[in-house]
Amino acid sequence: MKPIRVGLLGLGTVGVGVVKVLQSHREELEEKIGAPISLSAVADLDCTLSELPLTSEPAKVLDDPSIDIVVELIGGLEPARSFMLRALANGKHVVTANKALLATHGEELYAEARKRGRMLAFEAAVAGGIPLIRSVKEGLAANRITSLYGIVNGTSNYILSRMTDEGQEFARVLAEAQAQGYAEADPTFDVEGIDSAHKLQILATLAFRTSVKLKDIYVEGISKITPQDIALAREMGFRIKLLAIAKASDGRLELRVHPTMIPESSPMSAVSGVFNAVFLSGDVVNDLMFYGRGAGQMPTASSVWADIVEIARRLAAGQTGVPQDLPVLGRKPLALKPIEEVLSAYYLYVSALDQPAVLAQVAGILGKHEISIASVIQKVRQHAKAVPVVMMTHEAKEGSMQKALKEIDALRVIVDPTRMIRVEAS
């Protein structure tokens, strides 16, 4: 039988993993596909693996009429976007792990794939080795998904886990993570929630079958979380995680990424290190949890091969125009719920002068904005003048809390800006 020919763009960490899987699992892969598979061209400027059909010219992958599937693993927005559009225009199916590109230019790429009747597959773009994209698109086809939330960035979860277990400062744990290769030299995308927002955009677009703009996702990172916050959270029975959250209700969709306090009794609180986990609720299946390694060479390569095998199996069966469930375009998108209208409970760390009636002043401002206090912990003095007061509130609107915080921090008795973390009940 004619072999299925694959061209690979990029031979970085994941690209090398893709090659390793082919070298070690060729027999099983070809059995599942029903045809031989050939890695026909690898385009990478810095590759030194002499046994591969290497080229430094992407055109030899993109324009070769014999190549059936192009795997894009170079990352970034350009030239990755142009390469993928060119591959689709040349009648090739495309597999990618590029979450930033899909979150930014997904609609253009989905439209081109539809126009050309070709598959654009991206299992590896979200949650590494967890088969989450396929589950949302196919395994849950009978469901209306009502909510999804989870840990989708391994770097931030590793940092928070180390801060929780060892009581270390953010900056020190970040430096250790960089030294061990868990964090990039520039960790901004990971620790400031941008990478999680990319993944949430992709998941929400698929799960809620609506257009989602990256700019409409509220994003807040973990760089301001302190060991004090983590210790106090544990004292109150919570752990702090960076969550990506999407919820649909009353015809509107809320989308947010931010540090969140979750109960220690929740399975999500036990997800540590570089692992990812996503909870998903559907109206037919009810609640599901997906858990596994969210990054790394081999887990991500596993997901890349899941897409290659799916496309190659169909090609081997003679299906040249391959149908798929790409995000819906052209439909009126769900209205977005502004972050100001989102309901949440809150943790507040108020650092104030040791004077009478401080708590009454703070409570008065919260009450003015219809925010009720669930509990209060007053800690011992931290330095010469400041006395920390820790509060947990009942659910309130985000907009009301933001207004209250401005008024609280304007009080003459407040020493440092009040720290706030949202609290999820489950």
Image (cartoon, rainbow, N blue to C red):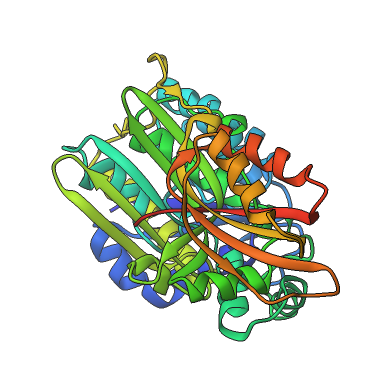
> Does any portion of residue 420 appear in the rendered image?
yes
Q: Pick the residue in front: 371 or 298.
A: 371
Q: Pick the residue in front: 208 or 399.
A: 399
Q: Residue furthest right?
A: 384
Compared to residue 107, the image places residue 413 above or below, namely below
Q: Residue furthest bottom?
A: 166
Q: Is residue 253 left or right of residue 182?
A: left
Q: Is residue 183 left or right of residue 17?
A: right
Q: Residue furthest front?
A: 356
- Residue at screen point 43% across, 72% down: 237
- Number of marks drawn: 0
Q: Quadrant of residue 377?
A: bottom right
- Residue at screen point 62% across, 77% down: 163
Q: Residue furthest left?
A: 284
> Does any portion of residue 50 appear in the rendered image?
no
Q: Position of residue 295 (x, y in %)?
A: 52, 66
Q: Quadrant of residue 63?
A: top right
Q: Is residue 97 left or right of residue 307?
A: right
- Residue at screen point 48% across, 64% down: 294
Q: Position of residue 323 (x, y in %)?
A: 29, 32
Q: Pick the residue in front: 77 or 249.
A: 249
Compared to residue 155, the image places residue 418 above or below, namely above
Q: Pick the residue in front: 367 or 322.
A: 367
